[in-house]
Amino acid sequence: MSRSEISPLISLAMPIVFTQVGMMVMGLVDMWMVGRLGTTSLASVALGDSWVFGTLVIAQGLIQGIDPLVTQAQGAKDPVALGRTLQRGFLLALGLLPLLVLSWQFSEEVLLILGQTESLSRNAAQYSHAQIFSIPAFLGFFVLKQYLQGRGHLAPMVITVIVANFANIAFNELFIFGGWGIPAMGIEGAGYATGASRCLMLLMLIVLAARGKYFSAGWVRWSRRSFSPRAMGALLALGIPVAIHFGVEVWTFQAATLMAGWIGESQIAAHIVVLKIISFTFMFPWGISGAATTRVGNLLGAAEPIQARLAGITALGLAILVMAILGSLIVWLDSSLPGVFSTDPRVLASAVALLPIAAGFQIFDGVQAVAAGILRGAGQTIPAAVIGVIGFPCITLPLSYHLTFTREMGLPGIWWAFFFGLLTASVLLVGWFLITSPNWKPIERRIAD
């Protein structure tokens, strides 16, 4: 690791971690407050949220095609490229809008096809339908968030998430249970509360970015060049592989959860409990990944490829260190962590048995996430997507089924499959980075201007 890169990476990573944890807390608060309505309502919202998240993550991946363009334009101090990329990010979000609207509008039909019960599918659809009005706000927020992150302006994101968390609690209480002349809307109200929080986040981020003058040296007037088909094609060429990488990872975890449900009720409960634990710890390498994307892209844009490579190596070292510490804590705390989510002895026993496996694969999960972030900063999104396909649907899914049902390992079989899938992905991603990084070059400037 390079000592000169540790401080810049940590300074970038910590606000990103805080932002991601804050957004996760919003989801946990939603689930906790809906849980007051009963188990059926909680299950319906969890199901609806799975579909909403599974579709949003693909849209997020497409939008993250702007990451290497923004970060490298910032490093090159190119305000025209920065402004054009932001404009094209908004245009891409506009194009994604009808696709997300349709996918949420027909969520009940999709969930029925996926084998969910009629009542759960119907209630889950109410939750997703109530959020449709907030899709433009979420897409706009995400574009602006990635733009600010790529330029190293992270304070507005942190402040926005803090305020949004308090507002989300108030919105949930008001729309779920009623008050101030607003009727109690239950599950549907939870969807409206989530949507209102998204709208607030966009408005706050715009205001804070404008007041802080974070658009200075990074904006140009709209013109015909803003709509350049060649530039939009280049943006999609970067974003589609990211969407594939995110999509296969998320949907592999979703498929694994379905497999856990085939084993039994206590097993799927244990599976979800451990997933919640590692989802929290994953926010730390996710923050390092975002920091690596920004730092590597900035340095490449500034024509410093050797320093960019050092930044990538340092980011990987930080990921290994952080995840080794967190993995050790998971094992040391043992049943204390699952006990936060469940008191059922069968669930606790199954969850505790999974923790050592989860602690081990956390290191490889962190490494693959950071390595993919490094490659995004360098504009190498296709290799990350190909390796993601190899590691998740090609290795993890069939191995999960084989170990769990053919070899009769039960629930641990799913987690051992993830261990080997993530190990493979991390080795391939790191290997690609180490082999190709000596020949890194900035993205062609004409694509972004």
Image (spheres, rainbow, N blue to C red):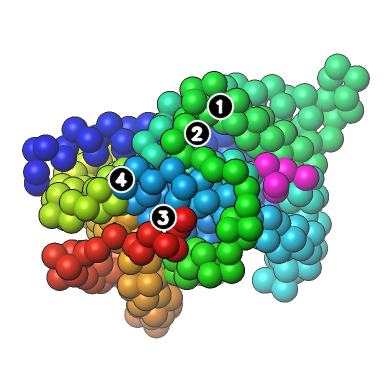
Relative to 246, does residue 45 appear above or below in the rendering? above
| Residue 202 in view (yes/no) | yes
Residue identified by numbered label 4: 75
Marks 4 and 1 close (CB-CB < 8 Å)? no
Classed neighbour count for the residue bearing mark 2: other residues with Cα under 10 Å, few (<14), some (14–19), many (≥20): some
Marks 2 and 1 close (CB-CB < 8 Å)? yes
Q: Earlier in the sequence, mark 3 or mark 2?
A: 3
The residue closer to the viewer here, 394 or 314, is 314
Q: Label 3 amino acid?
A: Leu
Q: Earlier in the sequence, mark 4 or mark 1?
A: 4
Residue identified by numbered label 2: 215
Highlighted magenta segment, given as a residue range: 133-137
Residue plotted at (13% across, 65% down): 438
Q: Label 4 amino acid?
A: Gly
Residue plotted at (37% across, 75% down): 386
Marks 3 and 2 close (CB-CB < 8 Å)? no
Residue identified by numbered label 1: 210
Marks 2 and 4 close (CB-CB < 8 Å)? no
- Give the CA distance from mark 1 to mark 3: 21 Å
Residue identified by numbered label 3: 69
Residue plotted at (25% across, 48% down): 302
Q: Earlier in the sequence, mark 2 or mark 4?
A: 4
